[in-house]
Image: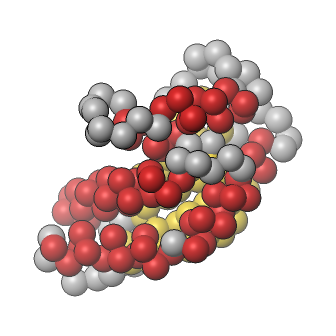
Amino acid sequence: MAGLPGSSVRNSNSADNFLRLHVRANSNSQTDQDIKYVVKSAIVDALTPLMVDVISKEQAMQKLNANLGLIESVADSVLESAGFDYGCRAQVRSEYFPTRDYNQYTLPEGVYDALIVELGTGTGDNWWCVVYPPLCFLENNIGGDTGVKYRSKLEEIIKRYF
């Protein structure tokens, strides 16, 4: 796979190399869209320390499946605190996704494994990133010092794929 800015991940096995995260809003109302971003931040924050030592997609899937209750609890807590009367459902499953750009990378259309977090009806627009390789978590640490340094391990993993 190419590692240059603007590169495209375009081979027949590329979907097999990625694990995506999609947080789907209850609806496209502004309030549902706004809370989606708060929930996604809380989920990424909760997953970051769990995923830092992950070295394969299979291991990432196992960790996510083992922590679905935590993911739902984090999302439900955010929703409840904000006064929303719907909860969420989280599961790891395969789904078809259209071509999407993520920072300087393009993921081609195809069937991908993904952590799907549906808020309420889950019929609104979604926010997405890549859990493995851990692009979500690298982005989460850019622009602010969290006091925890995960970046070198993440860059090492990312360099294997790009």
Q: Is residue 85 left or right of residue 41?
A: left
How far across and how far down the image is residue 33, in percent? 28, 58
Frontmost residue, 6 versus 64: 64
Which image quarter is the C terminus in? top right
How far across and how far down the image is residue 114, in percent? 61, 60
Q: Residue at x 84, y 44 (%)?
A: 13
Frontmost residue, 102 versus 27: 102
Quadrant hosting residue 74: bottom left
Q: Residue at x 29, y 39 (%)?
A: 146
Q: Residue at x 72, y 30 (%)?
A: 160
Image label count: 0
Q: Is residue 136 left or right of residue 76?
A: right
Quadrant hosting residue 10: top right
Residue 25 visible within the image: yes
Please, which residue is most extreme toward the bottom here? 85
How far across and how far down the image is residue 133, in percent? 62, 42
Is 90 located above or below residue 132 in the figure?
below
